[in-house]
Amino acid sequence: SQKIEQNSEALNIQEGKTATLTCNYTNYSPAYLQWYRQDPGRGPVFLLLIRENEKEKRKERLKVTFDTTLKQSLFHITASQPADSATYLCALDENNNDMRFGAGTRLTVKP
Amino acid sequence: NAGVTQTPKFRVLKTGQSMTLLCAQDMNHEYMYWYRQDPGMGLRLIHYSVGEGTTAKGEVPDGYNVSRLKKQNFLLGLESAAPSQTSVYFCASRPGTGGSYEQYFGPGTRLTVT
């Protein structure tokens, strides 16, 4: 069966450290993968998209990698801040229409 | 631009009652989506639409119907609500083919079925 798994339900790190979140998938062949941020009581907000032919994408303190052999994406936040505390969702799409999301990882950055 | 708006924000229904959730977007997007979000399960796609007058089933369509009579609106209907439909419902939209794949989400509707 198809699955999208995000490594842990919750991740706690100290301010200034790098947070690394993992998204693994099985029985999908996505053309691209996306990462979203969700704050409590709000809808998800798009952060980054990486295509199957790209190894790495960066945006300010964010970095995403995509390994289609391992069927895994890693999401990094460098120099993390308490304001980065949120739930992060990965999502993938095989056919341009039907998006599937992981359950999310709740990140807490402590001062 | 208001982006994606959802009506209502909260609703409590009794089992067997019906209701319609309204999603509106002012970005001229072709694609629109309805998701439900339950604790520990992430977002699950209910139905989606790739253009005015078209709809398609997603991962969990049973018990829901949708309509896209106007490009800017996507309605989600519950004909006979069940406690299992207690959830937070999110609508999203994105440009069509050739546009960005980024989805824009509404603020959500929290529905409780007793």
Image (cartoon, helix red, strand yellow):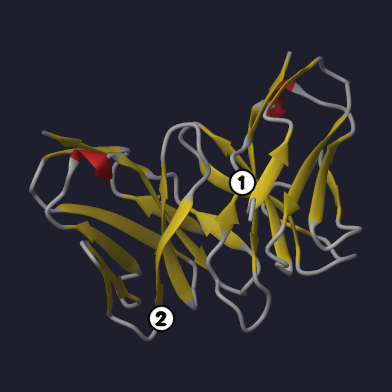
Q: Residues within 10 Å of mark 2 (few under 14, many from 20)?
A: few
Q: Which mark is residue A62?
A: none
Tell which of A13 and B83 is nearer to you: A13
Report the side of A94 relative to A13 (left or right).
Answer: right
Report the side of A22 relative to B106 (left or right).
Answer: left
Which residue carries the number 1 mark?
A: B106
- Identity of the amino acid at label 1? Gly
Tell which of B88 and A78 is nearer to you: A78
Tell which tag, 2 or 1, sits nearer the viewer. Answer: 1
Report the side of A79 relative to B62 (left or right).
Answer: left
Q: Quadrant of the C terminus of chain A?
A: top left
- Residue at figure coordinates x 60%, y 79% from the top left: B99
Which residue carries the number 2 mark?
A: A52
- Residue at figure coordinates x 50%, y 32% from the top left: A41
Looking at the image, residue B77 lies above or below residue B70: above
Instruction: Give x and y (percent) for residue A55.
Output: 28, 80
State the image quarter where residue A95 is shown.
bottom right
State the image quarter where residue A107 is shown.
top left
Instruction: Give x and y (percent) for residue B3.
Output: 63, 54
- Residue at figure coordinates x 43%, y 33% from the top left: A40
Using the image, name the chain to which the residue with label 1 belongs: B
- Identity of the amino acid at label 2? Glu
* Camera sees residue B2: yes
Looking at the image, residue B2 lies above or below residue B83: below
